Image (cartoon, rainbow, N blue to C red):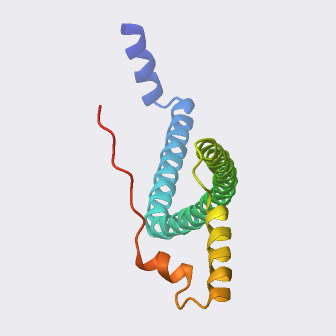
Amino acid sequence: MVKKLQKMAEKKAGNPTGLLDNQVAAMVKDSAQQIWLAGMGAFSKAQAEGGKVFEALMKEGMALQKKTQGLAEDRINAVTTKMTAVAGGVTDKAGAQWDKLESIFEARVAKALNKMGVPSRKDIDALIKRIDELSAKTGAPKTARAAAKKAPAKRAARKTA
């Protein structure tokens, strides 16, 4: 430690390297001052332009959001249209199946009623037409249709077990 103090004293006593050290120290001090001032300038500029940058970023964000929403709406509309078409096709197929089932049911009921001897609508219409023709020949004042409308058909009594 004593040796270090002696070297420092020699430098202060007129050693030419001490003058060089002062110049280096002054350059370092000036450089540090410039770096500090540059940092302060950058901070000031960022503070002044920060609002502008923030607003620009907001505008870009809003534009991106509108674009994304537009694409999402287009996709939703396309899917909705496709699902509506599929649902329409399914409804048409189901309706056709119900119509087919209904016609099969009606045919089987008509067949069963015919086997039991119950006259069909076609048979009744043919009989009414024949009665009207006979009434016209004999001069009867009422037609069979008018008589059928006035007198309701009697139902058979229900059998109870």
Q: Is residue 6 left or right of residue 108?
A: left
Figure quadrant of the C terminus: top left
Of 104 and 136, which appears nearest the observer?
A: 136
Residue furthest out toward the left: 160
In this view, 117 is above or below 138: above
Q: Residue at x 52, y 42 (%)?
A: 28
**Among the 4 quarters of the image, the one containing residue 92:** bottom right
- Residue 104 percent location from the top left of the image: 67, 45
**Among the 4 quarters of the image, the one containing residue 51:** bottom left
**Among the 4 quarters of the image, the one containing residue 43:** bottom left
Of 157 and 12, which appears nearest the observer?
A: 157
- Residue 134 percent location from the top left of the image: 66, 80
- Residue 123 percent location from the top left of the image: 66, 62
- Residue 11 percent location from the top left of the image: 47, 26
Q: Is residue 86 left or right of residue 143?
A: right
Of 104 and 155, which appears nearest the observer?
A: 155
